[in-house]
Amino acid sequence: MYMKDNEKEKQTLMIFIGAWVENMYIATQLTKDANKEKVALRIAEQKYILNSLMNVVANFQNDPEFKNLYLKLSDLKNLFNNLTVQGDDEKIVMDELQLKAITEKTQILRKEIVG
């Protein structure tokens, strides 16, 4: 609320996007080690967070600071949209190729943000 009241919404959103992308980057890198399945499940669950994030970013999609970022996040969202949701508990299933594609897209997005 403080950030909104002081017209800092864009800065707050940029910070949140950066933190989320960094979290995704670290998680995707961890899939190369032990407990790959557990980490991959947590990555798959980010589908819901990304959907919420995209709803907010959509408000700024024509803003020059967010336009390219919005497009890159949309590409990543499309990969998440291809994941299968199964069962009553809505478990998200991701195969190796999907994990690889999400990992690569996350690396590209992170590199663009950090330069």
Image (cartoon, rainbow, N blue to C red):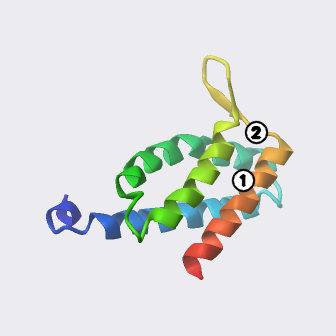
Q: Is residue 108 left or right of residue 50?
A: right
Res 16 label? none
Contact flag, marks 1 and 2 (Cβ < 8 Å): yes
Q: Which residue is mark 1?
A: 102
Q: Name the residue nearer the viewer: 100 or 29.
A: 100
Quadrant (top left/top right/bottom left/bottom right) for the N terminus? bottom left
Residue type indicated by callout 2: Met
When the figure is inspected, residue 42 is found, relative to residue 57, above or below; the finding is above
* Numbered circles on residues, count: 2
Res 94 label? 2
Q: Residue at x 32, y 66 (%)?
A: 10
Q: Residue at x 61, y 25 (%)?
A: 90
Q: Name the residue nearer the viewer: 22 or 76.
A: 76
Residue 14: x and y in percent read: 41, 67
Label located before the other in sequence (1 or 2): 2
Q: Name the residue nearer the viewer: 102 or 71.
A: 71
